[in-house]
Image (cartoon, rainbow, N blue to C red):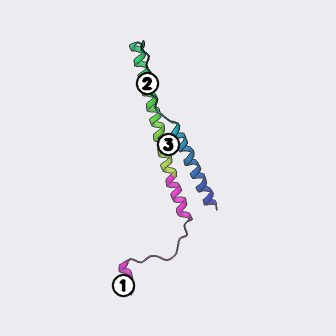
Amino acid sequence: MQIQVEIAAIRSQIDAIKQERATLSINDVVMYEDSSPLAIAEVYRNHRRETAQILTDIKGIDDAIAALKAELQNKQAQLKPSSGVQQQSPQQQLESA
């Protein structure tokens, strides 16, 4: 029962992180016709910084999702009943026959 609760919590966290990722976007550069060269350069510098930060955030979120999915698989594997019977290879089956 505890593992099922943990699985539900992991799934919930994955959904929340995916929603957070969906809100991240890179905005277009907005320029005005009468912008000075200095203003244009500053706009692009700011855009570069914002873009780099957003891409870093997205990478972190993707890494977190991957880690949570791996943990989810581990928990799901714990739920499966392990049988004490080992499967024999075809060679072993022939030898025991």
Give the amino acid type for the residue marked by disc 1 in the picture: Glu
Mark 1 vs mark 3, CA separation in Å: 52 Å
Rendered image: mark on residue 61: 3
**Residue farthest right in this picture:** 1
- Of the image marks 1 and 2, the number of the one nearer the N terminus: 2
Which residue extends farthest bottom? 97
What's drawn in magenta, residue-wise?
Answer: 69-97
Dot 3 crowding, Cα within 10 Å, few <14, some 14–19, many 20+: some
Q: Is residue 55 above or below residue 4?
A: above
Q: Is the residue marked by circle 1 packed among few (<14), some (14-19), or many (20+) residues within 10 Å?
A: few
Q: CA distance from mark 2 to mark 3?
A: 24 Å
Circle 2 sits in a helix, a strand or a loop, which is it? loop
**Residue linked to disc 2:** 29
Task: State which mark lies toward you, 1 or 3.
Answer: 3
Q: Are marks 1 and 3 in contact (CB under 8 Å)?
A: no
- The residue beneath circle 1 is 95
Q: Is residue 79 above or below residue 64?
A: below
Residue 4 in magenta stretch? no
Instruction: Tell me which amino acid carries mark 2.
Output: Val
Q: Is residue 95 magenta?
A: yes
Residue 40, quarter of picture: top left
Q: Residue 11: horizontal and vertical position, in percent? A: 57, 52
Which disc is residue 22 wearing?
none
Q: Nearer the viewer, mark 1 or mark 2?
A: 2
What x and y, as percent, mark residue 29? 43, 24
Tell me how many marks there are: 3
Element type at mark 1: helix
| In the foreground, 36 or 91 | 36
Residue type highlighted by circle 3: Ile
**Quadrant holding the N terminus:** bottom right
Magenta segment, prevailing SS (helix, strand or loop): helix
Of label 1 and label 3, which has the lower sequence position? 3
